[in-house]
């Protein structure tokens, strides 16, 4: 789920950047158009209504792009918050999982040490994972030693 959200955020980020680029291009077009209108106004070769319609069209495009920008950037901001929340949950679960495993490992070690006859080993001794796996593979579900089950 988190990877999907990252991909979605990346796509939205790219779209927001494209909109920003488009707005900047439109603003440049507007400046050029206004300069051309000023020159043509001096020469009298273009009417005021023609120049106003070009400017209005560009301004309308800018406004539409700005609306899209606000919508997409708002979605991106919400997605960013969601991703941060998922990352926090992931870290908490990772810590909990590790703690639960360590508790389980300690309990299993204590159980195995308690099952060994004549056990004089220290409680801090690390029990090999193969011992744990042997115990968990006991088909009878009892506490007998694997050597005893074969007899």
Image: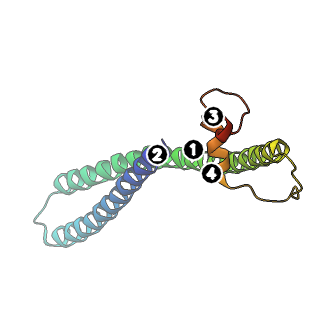
Number of the front mark, 3 or 1:
3
Number of the front mark, 4 or 1:
4
Marks 3 & 2, CB-CB < 8 Å contact: no
- Location of residue 17 in the rendering, given as x and y in whole percent from the top left corner: 37, 59
**What residue do we see at 70% from left, 39% from top?**
145
Using residue 51 as the reference point, say whether residue 123 is left or right of it: right
In the rendered image, which residue does mark 1 sit on? Answer: 82
Q: Nearer the viewer, residue 108 or 98?
A: 108
Using residue 89 as the reference point, say whether residue 68 is left or right of it: left
In the rendered image, which residue does mark 4 sit on? Answer: 130
| Position of 150 relative to 25 (above/below) | above
Within-10-Å neighbours for mark 4: few <14, some 14–19, many 20+: few
Marks 2 and 4 sit apart, C-alpha to C-alpha, by 39 Å
**What residue do we see at 85% from left, 43% from top?**
114
In the rendered image, which residue does mark 2 sit on? Answer: 5
| Position of 148 relative to 14 (above/below) | above
- Location of residue 79 in the rendering, given as x and y in whole percent from the top left corner: 51, 45
Number of the front mark, 3 or 2:
3
């Amino acid at each position: 789920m988190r990877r999907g959200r990252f991909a979605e955020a990346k796509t939205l980020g790219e779209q927001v950047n494209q909109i920003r680029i488009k707005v900047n291009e439109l603003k440049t077009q507007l400046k050029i158009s206004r300069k051309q209108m000023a020159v043509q106004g001096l020469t009298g070769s273009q009417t005021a209504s023609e120049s106003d319609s070009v400017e209005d069209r560009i301004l309308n495009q800018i406004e539409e792009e700005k609306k899209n920008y606000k919508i997409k950037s708002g979605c991106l901001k919400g997605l960013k918050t969601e991703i941060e929340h998922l990352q926090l949950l992931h870290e908490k679960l990772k810590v909990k999982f590790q703690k639960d495993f360590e508790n389980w490992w300690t309990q299993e070690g204590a159980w195995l040490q308690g099952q060994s006859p004549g056990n004089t080993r220290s409680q801090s001794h690390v029990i090999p994972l193969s011992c744990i796996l042997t115990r968990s593979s006991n088909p009878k579900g009892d506490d007998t030693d694997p050597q005893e089950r074969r007899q």
